């Protein structure tokens, strides 16, 4: 265990990815204490304020706060800096929960398809069917059908990812079930669910974790796309996609409304992907660099 | 001695720091003259393959030679530029590898692969190259050379693939032929043919052969000179008869002593107890369906029968594809037989569903071939060890006490229960696998090639352990192996299988002395030569 941690820490992509992600998590958690105001509050005195302006922000109840508009305000007079920081929360939560939902459901289906011959054909044909629908269209349709709430967005992004996880887990299980230690467990009269959870799943964890990071990265991106298209979370919730969508109309005069959230979105996806690449190098022996 | 084709002088190859020793090869010297075969023999990790790859210039980047010289006809190979080495490989030295399937490119036809070699090293026109390839294919006794040209590696048998590799190695008549365990992955009958082929080619071309092997029987068959290696050091070297008959070093004697002979020991009294495990008319047919749903069946096993009683050892021998593992797996119900009956004690289990089979599974346990894969790498040895006993109703404390006791019986420290399988050697892992099987208190232990992946000295220890367990517990042993020598030493009765059928069976001594069937005779003939008797050490 210790040696794995040391190997992870020695990998530069992992170090970079993890530090950027750590910083983003800190920003998301500490958002209320980082000089932000209510991200939904509008101040009619500050419509389209330029980035870097100092001034006072007047909340709806009339209280005025001294405030630095690091990233300016939008055409409703909302503070973009506050909205971007609170948007980090949404993005990270969506990324993490989507990965967990997709891994849980896909992992379960993959284990069933891989271990039980009878389920394999039916399950995998359903998965093939799901994979034939473009992910983003499927997500849009699901959000449209279920209504735009945080959990529906997460489910809508997770469902198109499930077939990929199922396929991965199924192929891992097909290999692992032939391993002598699994056969030995069968000969030791270990019940099938225990074989799956104790002997097969732990040996499939490494590729699953790697796949999970890539799902998280793509979920962050997809959530932003859905919001940008106006199909994601409702406009009153600050997400990077919503901020960009609202800033789009005045992009030529006030490019900051689009650029600042993008400046957060890009490193987030990059950091998660780098982390995934690094984890794959370290955890997945197929890609391990030769170290004799 | 200046006539030597290859001479290695005081060669040392450093391992990366942090390994269990500083050098993979330490201060080894050897010389091979034209027309001579030098066998380098040693157990795994002795550095013999590292030496071969050093000569070829194919050493892993993490290793580097840090002292000594390698001279091919006087030319230093360690200082040679990569381009010069490329030129020499194939032209002045050919190499035959252990696993012909991975030595060949699976997406190129065999003809194209050999042609590529010729096109690189000669300026012959295409027609001449083709003629030469056909000539060599004929020479290495490949059937239908024209067809072989167009064949892809996966369409050939293991022996045929190795012949292609040999054809590539010898086509340019290299002065030096390096063979790295060329017959280890092959069946005995094929091994015999390949060894003879290499010897014939060597005589024709007058090349020097550096032959790496772990098998003393192979050494006895083909070597002129022998070099014994251990832990990267040369232990002993000399002419074959000298080393095999009058070994000077204790290590060589130990190595030779561990090689099982083909002569079975005196038979034990026949057991009279009831059968613990038996199969009658067991068959397994695989049905593959194509996309139209048309069935194509393959009979992997037909009409096989066996009886194992308490305290006796029954061997099943055969080459790869003979159906011996399929039979064993049907008997322990890891696969479902398609016909026949299997009895565990008095219970018929051939078609029993898994949930009704599970309570009976403590009667028959199994030990597999590959010690690296038979223990779950993510669980501690202790966790693996208590699993079986707890499945059969023991409490955790009872199971742990039993595990500790079993660790003593397989001569491993009790503290080892806390460790993970990767912290053990192959032989130790095989002990753990045996202990795990014994933890269920089985009546029959099925050992499927359980010693085939181990070095001879470790193999001898594991066989001893199995025999002790049998004597102590009255176990019935079903021992599946391709190694006739191991079967001779361990088994009371032997069943010979070929192409999914039982060809012949009988008490070991009688069967080995007077095989009745042609196939059995061929199999026994092909077994590596018996070692000459060792003379006692004279001071």
Image (cartoon, grey):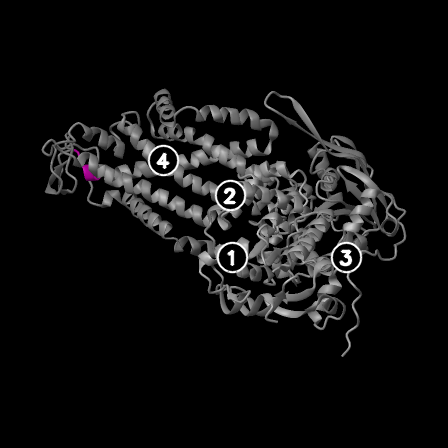
Q: Are marks 1 and 3 on the same chain?
A: yes
Identify the image quadrant of residue B357: top right
Q: Are marks 3 and 2 on the same chain?
A: yes
In the image, residue A115 lies at what x, y percent?
59, 34
Q: How far is the residue under mark 1 from the one under mark 2?
A: 21 Å
Question: What residue does disc 4 label?
Answer: A218
Question: What residue does disc 3 label?
Answer: B529
In the image, residue B161 lies at what x, y percent?
63, 44
> Marks 3 and 4: CB-CB under 8 Å?
no
Q: Which residues are magenta?
A: A78-82
Q: Name the quadrant of the C terminus of chain B.
A: bottom right
- Tell me which label, 3 or 2, sits earlier in the chain: 2
Q: Are marks 2 and 4 on the same chain?
A: no
Host chain of mark 1: B
Secondary structure found at label 1: helix
From the viewer's perspective, is the residue at label 1 or at label 3 nearer? 1
Which circle marks residue B88 in the picture? 1
> Marks 1 and 2: CB-CB under 8 Å?
no
Q: How far is the residue under mark 3 from the one under mark 4?
A: 63 Å
> Marks 1 and 4: CB-CB under 8 Å?
no
């Amino acid at each position: 265990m210790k040696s794995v941690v040391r190997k992870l820490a020695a990998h530069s992509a992992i170090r970079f990815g993890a530090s950027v992600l750590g910083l983003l998590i800190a920003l998301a958690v500490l958002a209320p204490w980082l000089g932000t105001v209510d991200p939904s509050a509008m101040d009619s005195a500050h419509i389209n304020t330029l980035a870097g302006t100092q001034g006072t922000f007047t909340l709806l109840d009339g209280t005025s706060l001294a405030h630095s508009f690091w990233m300016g305000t939008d055409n409703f007079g909302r503070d973009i800096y506050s909205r971007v920081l609170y948007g980090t929360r949404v993005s990270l939560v969506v990324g993490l929960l989507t990965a967990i939902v997709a891994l849980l459901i896909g992992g379960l289906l993959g284990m069933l398809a891989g271990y039980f011959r009878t389920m394999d054909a039916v399950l995998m044909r359903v998965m093939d069917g799901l994979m034939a629908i473009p992910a983003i269209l499927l997500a849009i349709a699901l959000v449209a059908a279920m209504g735009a709430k945080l959990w529906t967005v997460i489910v809508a992004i997770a469902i198109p990812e499930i077939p990929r996880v199922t396929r991965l887990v199924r192929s891992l299980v097909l290999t692992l079930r032939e391993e002598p230690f699994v056969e030995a467990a069968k000969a030791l009269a270990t019940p099938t669910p225990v074989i799956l959870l104790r002997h097969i799943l732990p040996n499939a964890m490494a590729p699953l974790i790697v796949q999970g990071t890539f799902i998280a990265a793509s979920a962050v991106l997809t959530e932003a796309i859905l919001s940008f298209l106006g199909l994601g979370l409702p406009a009153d919730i600050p997400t990077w996609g919503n901020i960009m969508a609202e800033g789009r109309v005045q992009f030529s005069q006030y490019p900051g409304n689009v650029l600042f959230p993008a400046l957060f979105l890009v490193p987030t996806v990059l950091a998660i992907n780098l982390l995934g690449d690094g984890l794959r190098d370290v955890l997945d022996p197929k890609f391990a660099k030769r170290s004799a | 001695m200046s006539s030597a084709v290859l001479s290695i002088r005081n060669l040392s190859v450093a391992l990366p720091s942090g390994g269990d020793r500083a050098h993979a090869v330490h201060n080894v010297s050897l010389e091979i003259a034209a027309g001579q075969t030098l066998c380098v023999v040693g157990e795994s990790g002795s550095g013999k393959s590292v030496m071969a790859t050093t000569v070829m210039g194919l050493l892993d980047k993490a290793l580097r030679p840090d002292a000594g010289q390698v001279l091919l006809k006087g030319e230093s190979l360690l200082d040679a530029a990569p381009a010069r080495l490329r030129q020499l490989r194939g032209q002045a030295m050919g190499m035959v590898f252990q696993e012909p399937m991975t030595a060949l490119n699976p997406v190129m036809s065999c003809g194209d692969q050999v042609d590529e070699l010729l096109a690189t090293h000669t300026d012959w026109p295409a027609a001449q190259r083709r003629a030469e390839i056909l000539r060599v294919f004929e020479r290495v006794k490949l059937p239908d050379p024209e067809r072989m040209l167009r064949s892809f590696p996966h369409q050939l048998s293991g022996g045929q693939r190795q012949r292609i590799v040999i054809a590539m190695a010898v086509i340019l008549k290299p002065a030096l032929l390096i063979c790295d365990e060329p017959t280890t992955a092959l069946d005995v009958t094929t091994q015999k043919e390949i060894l003879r082929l290499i010897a014939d080619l060597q005589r024709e071309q007058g090349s020097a052969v550096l032959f790496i092997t772990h098998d003393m029987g192979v050494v006895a068959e083909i070597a002129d000179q022998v070099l014994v290696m251990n832990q990267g050091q040369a232990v002993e070297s000399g002419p074959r008869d000298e080393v095999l008959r009058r070994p000077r070093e204790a290590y060589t004697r130990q190595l030779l002593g561990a090689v099982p002979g083909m002569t079975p020991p005196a038979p034990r009294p026949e057991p009279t107890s009831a059968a613990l495990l038996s199969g009658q008319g067991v068959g397994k047919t695989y049905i593959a369906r194509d996309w139209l749903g048309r069935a194509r069946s393959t009979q992997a096993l037909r009409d096989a029968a066996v009886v194992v009683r308490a305290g006796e050892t029954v061997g099943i021998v055969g080459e790869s594809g003979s159906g011996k593992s399929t039979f064993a797996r049907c008997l322990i119900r890891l696969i479902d037989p398609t016909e026949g009956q299997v009895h565990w004690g008095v219970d018929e289990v051939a078609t029993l569903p898994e949930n009704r089979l599970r309570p009976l599974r403590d009667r028959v346990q199994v030990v597999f071939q590959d010690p690296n894969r038979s223990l779950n790498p993510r669980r501690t040895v202790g966790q693996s060890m208590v699993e079986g006993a707890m499945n059969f109703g023991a409490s955790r404390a009872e199971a742990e006490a039993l595990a500790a006791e079993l660790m003593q019986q397989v001569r491993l420290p009790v503290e080892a229960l806390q460790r993970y399988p990767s912290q053990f050697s192959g032989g130790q892992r095989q002990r753990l696998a045996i202990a795990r099987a014994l933890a269920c208190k089985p009546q029959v232990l099925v050992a499927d090639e359980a010693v085939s992946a181990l070095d001879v000295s470790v193999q001898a220890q594991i066989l001893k352990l199995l025999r002790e367990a049998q004597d102590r517990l009255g176990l019935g042993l079903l021992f599946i192996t391709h190694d006739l020598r191991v079967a001779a030493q361990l088994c009371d009765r032997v069943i010979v299988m070929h192409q999914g059928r039982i060809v012949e069976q009988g008490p070991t001594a009688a069967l080995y002395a007077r095989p009745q069937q042609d196939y059995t005779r061929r199999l026994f003939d092909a077994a590596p030569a018996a070692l000459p008797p060792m003379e006692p050490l004279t001071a």
